[in-house]
Image (cartoon, rainbow, N blue to C red):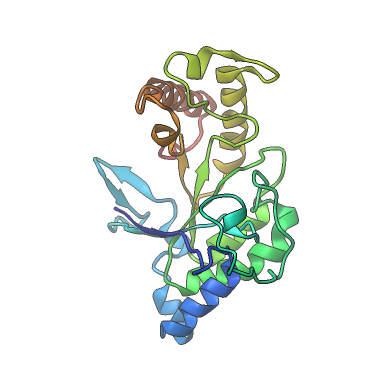
């Protein structure tokens, strides 16, 4: 049910988010039919889980069609992949973001207010975020997304602080890390702040508990008990606070 999520890179491995979307929009013939392509209205929030299926608030089956929104506005080859000397990166409209910078906070409105309508024009109904800073407001992003028929997948883990370390269990939840502190305590503290902020929005689609940890941990799935531990603790927190039980 989590349909296709799009990660877009140009031929020369340059992240040019707005150019990519504009090109797709030109190729597709959907520019004049935005209302018809938006499959989720505000009356359909929140999306709910029943058994192992997703339904909107009207009881209709819901199928996610999403885009991962994480614009860095930089040359992809500078971070990952093989650099091609023949590749000359373009000049992005906006300045590059730090790798762990939050792209959806209110102070980033100049960027996302342009991108979100284009994502909706593509026919997407879900946006997946990264690196949420719970000390910043995301009200502008969430409200604009809702107005466009977009639900939002919100990560509970972050890259710089409040992360789930790629260590075998139980270290990934109980280890004291040098110059950082207790892995589980910092992670749970950060995750609860994110849950506090985003539980108020009906278009919060789900919380993402972990991201590619099986790729990062050398023993593969050895860290998954810590993913289950965080899931358990957030479920308890949702119940304790009386929040809507946003799926994890």
Q: Is residue 135 left or right of residue 44?
A: right
- In this rendering, the answer to whether 194 lies above or below 129 is above
List x then y, in percent, for residue 86: 58, 69
Q: Nearer the viewer, residue 3 or 239?
A: 3
Q: Position of residue 16 (x, y in %)?
A: 59, 67
Q: Quadrant of residue 41?
A: bottom left
Residue 142 is at least partly visible in this image? no
36, above or below 105, in the image: below
Residue at 48% from the left image edge and 84% from the top image edge: 26
Residue 238 % position (x, y)? 49, 29
> In the visual, does 52 lie left or right of 134?
left
Q: Nearer the viewer, residue 55 or 4?
A: 4
**Residue 29 showing in the rendered view:** yes
Instruction: Identify whether 155 is placed above or below 139.
Output: above
Q: How many marks?
A: 0
Q: Position of residue 228 (x, y in %)?
A: 39, 24
Residue at image position (58%, 74%) is 19
Residue name at image x 71 percent, y 61 percent: 109
- The quarter in which the C terminus is drawn is top left
Which residue of the protein is positioned furthest toward the left in this rendering? 51
Please determine whether, in this image, residue 193 is positioned above or below residue 60. Answer: above
């Amino acid at each position: 049910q989590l349909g296709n999520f799009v990660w877009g890179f140009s031929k020369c491995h340059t992240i040019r988010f707005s150019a990519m979307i504009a090109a797709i929009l030109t190729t597709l013939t959907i520019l004049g039919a935005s209302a018809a392509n938006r499959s989720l209205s505000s009356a359909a929030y929140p999306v709910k889980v029943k058994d192992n299926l997703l339904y909107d608030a009207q009881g209709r089956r819901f199928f996610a069609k999403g885009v991962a929104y994480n614009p860095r506005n930089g040359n992809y080859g500078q971070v990952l992949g093989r650099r091609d000397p023949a590749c000359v990166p373009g000049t992005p409209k906006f300045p590059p973001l730090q790798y762990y910078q939050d792209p959806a906070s209110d102070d980033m409105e100049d960027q996302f207010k342009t991108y979100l309508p284009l994502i909706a024009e593509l026919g997407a109904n879900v946006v997946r975020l990264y690196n949420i800073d719970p000390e910043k407001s995301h009200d502008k992003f969430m409200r604009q997304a809702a107005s466009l028929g977009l639900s939002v997948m919100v990560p509970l883990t972050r890259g710089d602080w409040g992360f789930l370390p790629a260590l075998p269990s139980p270290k990934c939840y109980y280890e004291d890390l040098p110059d950082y502190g207790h892995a589980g305590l910092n992670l749970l503290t950060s995750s609860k702040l994110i849950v506090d902020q985003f539980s108020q929005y009906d278009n919060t689609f789900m919380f993402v508990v972990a991201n590619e940890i099986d790729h990062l941990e050398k023993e593969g799935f050895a860290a998954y008990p810590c993913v289950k531990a965080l899931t358990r603790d957030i479920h308890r927190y949702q119940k304790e606070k009386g929040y809507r039980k946003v799926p994890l």
